[in-house]
Image (tube, rainbow, N blue to C red):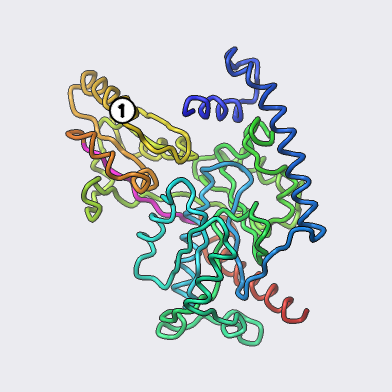
Amino acid sequence: MEKLRRVVKEIAYVQDYTKLSTLHQSLIPILSLASSLYRVVLSIRHYLYHFGFFSKHRLPVPVISVGNLTWGGNGKTPMVEFISSWLADSGISPLILTRGYAGGDEARMLTRHLRGKAVKIGVGANRAATAACFFKRHGYVDPRDYLVEGKWHEQKEGSWINSRKVGVVVLDDGMQHWSLQRDIEIVMVNGLTPWGNHQILPLGPLREPLTALGRADVVVIHHANLVSEHNLRDIKLMMREVKKSLRIFFTRMSPSHFFEVGNINTRIPLDILCNGVVLCVSAIGSANAFVQGIKKMGTLYVDRLDFSDHHSLQDTDIEIIRMKLKELEDKFGSMPVVVITEKDYDRDPEILRHLSPYKVMALCSELQIIPCRDNGDDDFKKLLKELVEVKVLGANQN
């Protein structure tokens, strides 16, 4: 199954099918048929929601959705953390709603990063039901309580920040979760591989056609620091053909430190990899960005083993990793270091211990908004405030 996933992903991101192997090309007709069927189902589902055959739940607090048009690696979870941390620091307690896909690695990482802040995390496929449970247990804040004369009024520490009540819901991976109404739609785009072959799943990486960008309030191009100005300009032009008024921001992942598997409380400086031999092992949506980041740390040599997004390592995978490590050790005459992402650590921290005596370290990074004219960190937060103000006031007038 892992091999099939890798083959499908390679097809989804290739621009010229003639360069594919015979095996890859033999799968294209099957994937094309499946994509056509998926497109039909998507259209029917959209029709049923649009005309009210399927209901949309309205929550009593503003909902900020963070989603994407393609499969993983778009920076959704780091953006959810960024927004939730800012809300908590502003005195408004957010509730993160996440489906807990593939064992809940993202939820565990969010819990660790946001520990000590007034942030709640609800895990479950039925987001409306999960939210209802939290509202019943903790209560919620009427948004008019933090809008003074229609303007967002940040609370001082000691007011809302210590309250158990939920002030805002942040919807993780929410763009295709149509059963829940949202007030702000943020769409994350992987700048390194924005649309792949422009085809719908499973032939391509798109969950919906690009016209779905018309629903977005904000688009964020992630890993923008690794993308050329020319390519960034092309991505912006393509999106503004769908919606001219889109506000577009740029983000990057900024590495801060490592921790060693088995001792999560350690803070190992980034320069530990200087002149070292490294094996990057990951099961994430955008391994290229992760590996490029490691290469910039002054390493002597970097090799990689990529697994499909959310893949849980098995004993056979550990053996493959150990074989690769032995090859690197024989080649360079020193023990290589294994570097993984935090998501890989949270998926199954115990199995990584089986790589002993090789050292395994997890890279810790945080999302940063890249300043660009009037689209910087403060501008992003100001825009979210304004959008909440408009939606809340509009709802009250209705």
* 132 is higher (above) or lower (below) than 185: below
Residue sticking out furthest to the right: 51
In the rendered image, residue 317 lying in the magenta stretch gets the answer no
Does residue 143 lie above or below 265 as drawn?
below
Q: Image height check: is 124 above or below 350? A: below
Residue drawn where x is 59% and y is 30% of the image: 13
User: Which residue bears the numbered disc 1?
Assistant: 321
Q: Which quadrant holds the C terminus?
A: bottom right
Boundaries of the magenta span: 359-368
Is residue 86 found left or right of 117 in the rendered image? right
Q: Where is residue 49 in the image (x, y as percent from the top left)?
A: 76, 56
Q: Seen in the image, is 242 located left or right of residue 366? A: right
Let me know if residue 38 appears in the view. yes
Residue 46, image x and y in percent? 76, 51
Which amino acid is tagged 1?
Ile
Category of crowding for the residue at label 1, using alpha-carbon neighbours closer than 10 angstroms: few (below 14), some (14–19), many (at least 20): some
